[in-house]
Structure formats: structure tokens, C-alpha cells
Amino acid sequence: MLTLAVVLTVVGGLVAFVAGPLVLADWIHARRRETIARQIAVTDAIHGELGAVVAPVVTRRLGGPWEVVIPVPFDRPALVERVLAIAHRTLASSRGRDVRIVLTPQARVAAPSYIAPTSRARAA
């Protein structure tokens, strides 16, 4: 009887040792897929109505609410209002936890500058 208990304990331990990391990896993968799906949904909704004006990033901390960080141009309040309304509408229709929408200032992108090569640069 004691031998059977030892064998079952060893086999159970080996199964847990192999299956545990697999279950954990599957859970992490499913969580990542859900995060990506929400980010795509928000991005597609905004881009579908306004074009490619912002690039939201969706994250979720363990046990915390969903967080959507959207860099917006604060100098265009009408656009900020529409982006916020679209993001809220898109995420309100999704199931799950609370959602926190964080608006951050959008970085200004400088126009690319092209400097034509001079005759000195060609001679070098």
C-alpha cells in the first residue's frame, strides 16, 4: 500500500512538473491574444472613422483593469473628443473588466529633411 502511494505521488509530481508550465504558457498566450484583439478593435474603429490619426496601445496588469493609452494631439480638441468617444464606444461593447483610457500628448513628428549632396561631398 505504501508503494502504491509513493508511485502515485511520484507520477503526480511528474505530471504536475510537465503540465504546470504548459498550462501557464497557454494562459499567458490566451491573455496576450485577448490584449492584441482589443488593441486591433480600438485601432480599427478609430482608423475606420478618422483615418490613421492615433495609435492606441492596450495593456492589462495582472488583476487590474484594461488600460488604453492613446497619444492624441491636444491642440485639436474636436479630434480628441471624437477619438475618446470612439474608443469608449468600442471598449464598452466588449465584455470583461473595467477600462481605463489614458490620453497622452502626441509626439510631434518633424518633416523629413533632405540635404542634396554638394560637390565637396562627392569629391571626398
Image: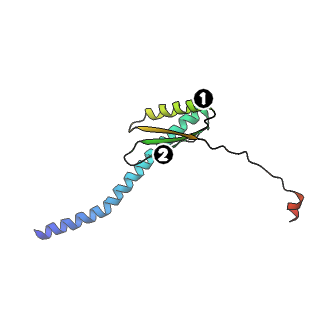
Q: Which residue is drawn at 39% across and 36% down?
A: 95
The kind of residue on which mark 2 rests is Ile
Q: Based on the displayed image, in which of its 4 quarters is residue 48 positioned?
A: top right
Q: In the displayed structure, would residue 8 be above or below residue 89?
A: below
Horizontally, is 15 left or right of 97 in the view? left
Which residue is the site of mark 2? 36
Say which amino acid is labelled 1.
Ala
Find residue 57 and report its horizontal and vertical position in percent: 52, 44
Q: Where is residue 60 in the image (x, y as percent from the top left)?
A: 43, 46
Can you tell which mark lies on residue 78? 1
Horizontal and vertical percent for residue 101? 48, 38
Separation of marks 2 and 1 at Cα, in angstroms? 28 Å
**Neighbours of disc 1 within 10 Å: few (<14), some (14-19), many (20+):** few
Residue at image point 56% right, 35% down: 46
Tell me the quadrant of the picture where the C terminus can be found. Answer: bottom right
Point out residue 8 in the picture as x, y percentages from the top left corner: 19, 65
The foreground one among 98 and 90 is 98
